[in-house]
Image (cartoon, helix red, strand yellow):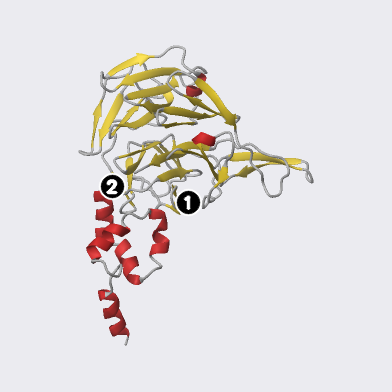
Amino acid sequence: MAKIEENFLQHEALIPGLPDDLALKCLVRISHGYHGLLECVSKRWRDAIRSEEYARLKALEGFCGNWIFISTSNGSRWEAYDTEADRWEPLPIMPVSGCNSVNKIIGFSCVTVCHKFLVIGGQTVSPVHQEVLSDVAVFDPFKKEWYMAARMRRARLGFACVAISGKVYLAGGHNFTCPSGFRDAEVYDPCIDRWDYLLAMPFPLVGCFGLSRGKHFYVVGKKEPRATQYTHILFTIEEQEWQVLENTDPYINFGLSSIMEEMVYFFDEETIEALGQKEFDILCSCPALFLPDHERPLRPSGACLVGSKRRLYLIGGLTIKFDTQSCSYSVVQLNSTRFCEVTSLSEEWQNARLMLSQAGRVLGCAVMTE
């Protein structure tokens, strides 16, 4: 009887009335976040969704999904939020070459390019070993697994990094042998898995972050590790030239920025602001946070502001609350996910599904869209 049932399942159509190849093409259009539900439909659906052919068809059609990748307490552990399905999923633990017991990775950069998620460089932190990395770990959303790409030309941390026109650009940073920083810049082509040097910056920069607008790569960093002032440099992709910028807006001194449709949205833990081509506007106050056992509204710090599909998301962070009984303050790690349509930013923030872990301060985040 069991064998008869197994034979029946093997010949059962994925979708009644459709050939299996056409049915599979229909299923690949469904967002990754619904896969758990789809696998509950039947054993055939489960096997189909876990098959190599399903992953191949998704990659062929470019149905990578709309994801927000977040790392908080540990740079090698990531969670991914499917904005369409409103679901968080844990990613497999990220590989780190030569390290089996990494407590934390700091100073890395992360970007999405060509439907892949890249975590680049940084420094490992563990009781027995610390190393600055040239690693490039790549997450494939179709196969749902990590692999290692070509290493950077130079190991570095605290560098600026962006994705522009299907390539990854990075500049600046430092390592143990050169704490004063680097002038050099690199570009990565994922199609041929190769890094090449770019024209060097006019001077070294450390503690950097990067922004991209159109074909422009903005590098923001310090000329010295102890400097209090940030320096702003612009690299134009088409001209392959660096330009030192003067009189830049204060928003760019912080890494809590997100770019969506040529608008820069900035979160300074008090307000959310936007910068167009010329004008700089305060859009709204940072949305208040209410905890179940706390009466007063609280403000998050160390959260991440990201934009995807005309929505702004405010994720994770920390807050400080006061306990009236013990008359003491305590730090609360947040796992909240809140969003707002950019057209109604000042009106209403909505709660989305909570993160899987008590997130706390966000170490890295990146957005992938189809």
Query: Can you see residue 174?
Result: no
Q: Earlier in the sequence, mark 2 or mark 1?
A: 2
Quadrant where the C terminus sits is top left
List x then y, in percent, for residue 279. 48, 19
The local crowd at label 1, few if under 14, some if 14 to 19, many if 20 or more residues have their Cα within 10 Å, is few
Q: Secondary structure at mark 2?
A: loop
Residue at 39% in and 63% down: 38
Residue at 33% in and 20% down: 235
Query: Can you see residue 338?
Result: yes
Q: Which residue is mark 1?
A: 86
Count of labels in the image:
2
Q: Secondary structure at mark 1?
A: loop
> What's under tag 1, amino acid-wise?
Asp
Which labelled disc corresponds to residue 236? none
Picture quarter containing residue 135?
top left
List x then y, in percent, for residue 281. 53, 23
Along the horizontal axis of the image, is 185 left or right of 338?
Answer: left
Picture quarter containing residue 10?
bottom left
Picture quarter containing residue 45?
bottom left
Along the line of sight, the residue nearer the viewer: 121 or 292? 292
Along the line of sight, the residue nearer the viewer: 340 or 286? 340
List x then y, in percent, for residue 75. 44, 43
Q: Which residue is mark 2?
A: 62
Q: Are marks 2 and 1 in contact (CB under 8 Å)?
A: no
Residue at 35% in and 14% down: 243
Q: Is residue 190 above or below residue 57?
A: above
Q: Is residue 181 above or below residue 363?
A: above
> What's under tag 2, amino acid-wise?
Gly
Q: Is residue 114 above or below residue 235?
A: below
Q: Farthest residue to the top: give it.
A: 246
The local crowd at label 2, few if under 14, some if 14 to 19, many if 20 or more residues have their Cα within 10 Å, is some
